[in-house]
Amino acid sequence: MNGNRGFDRIWGENGNDVLNGGAGNDSLAGGAGNDLLRGDDGNDDLWGGFGFDTLFGGRGDDELEGNQGNDLLYGGQGRDDLEGDGGNDRLFGNEGNDEIEGDDGADILHGNQGNDTLDGGRGNDILAGGIGADRFEFDLGDGRDRIVDFQNGLDRIEIDDLDRGQVQRAINGAVQQGGDTILTVNASTVIVLEDFNRANLDLNDFTF
């Protein structure tokens, strides 16, 4: 199903749908099934629904939500907001300062270009900020997450509900394991900084 120029609202139904918004600020909802949604130009709102969906925001400041299933989300150009919801999702912000949230499941998040905010949510996630000054957000109980490209002096880590003293104690207990730094906040919250020297980790790498 294809939209035209202007503000289109397109809903799929049961089955594997292909929805194209075209130019304009469009709203696309896939419904049940393994759907393909393309927002194209404009500030679009894409919702995958149930199933293993693929969402492309295209140009503009888009909002993409995978919902249930192992979804694939691409923000495209612009300041995009991506949310995987349930399932083991892969999310790519691409260009712009994007907000990327995996939610439940073992998710893979890529910020790519721009100053992005990445939050894997619950589950053992892999986070890659890419180019830019990125922020990695964590809650207690998120699981064992890996940051694959943490840039000392540029990127920042935020751990909700922890003050400076609590974070300093976690830093003091961090260990070097091969080339990686292991930061254990508690039994259910572990942050692995790949290819990062433990000696370089201090409070300046965190935001409060």
Image: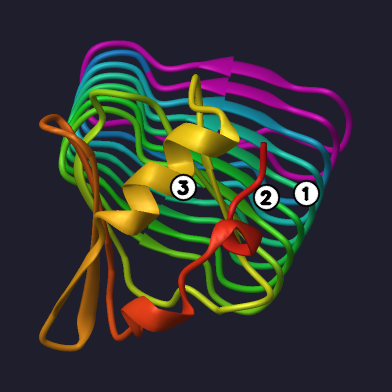
- Is residue 109 at least partly visible in the picture? yes
Amino acid carrying mark 3 in the image:
Gln
Q: Are marks 2 and 1 in contact (CB under 8 Å)?
A: yes
Q: Which residue is mark 1?
A: 79
Nearest the viewer among 139 and 203 is 203
Q: Which residue is mark 2?
A: 98
Q: Is residue 149 above or below residue 106?
A: below
Label 1, label 3: how many angstroms apart (C-alpha)?
Answer: 33 Å
Q: Which residue is mark 3?
A: 168
Q: Is residue 122 above or below residue 165?
A: above
> With 179 as the anchor, is 60 left or right in this view?
right
Q: Which residues are magenta?
A: 1-30
Amino acid carrying mark 1 in the image:
Arg
Label 2, label 3: how many angstroms apart (C-alpha)?
Answer: 29 Å
Asked whether 146 falls inside the magenta stretch, the response is no
Residue that appears at 78% across and 49% down: 79
Q: Secondary structure at mark 2?
A: loop
> With 158 as the anchor, is 133 left or right in this view?
right
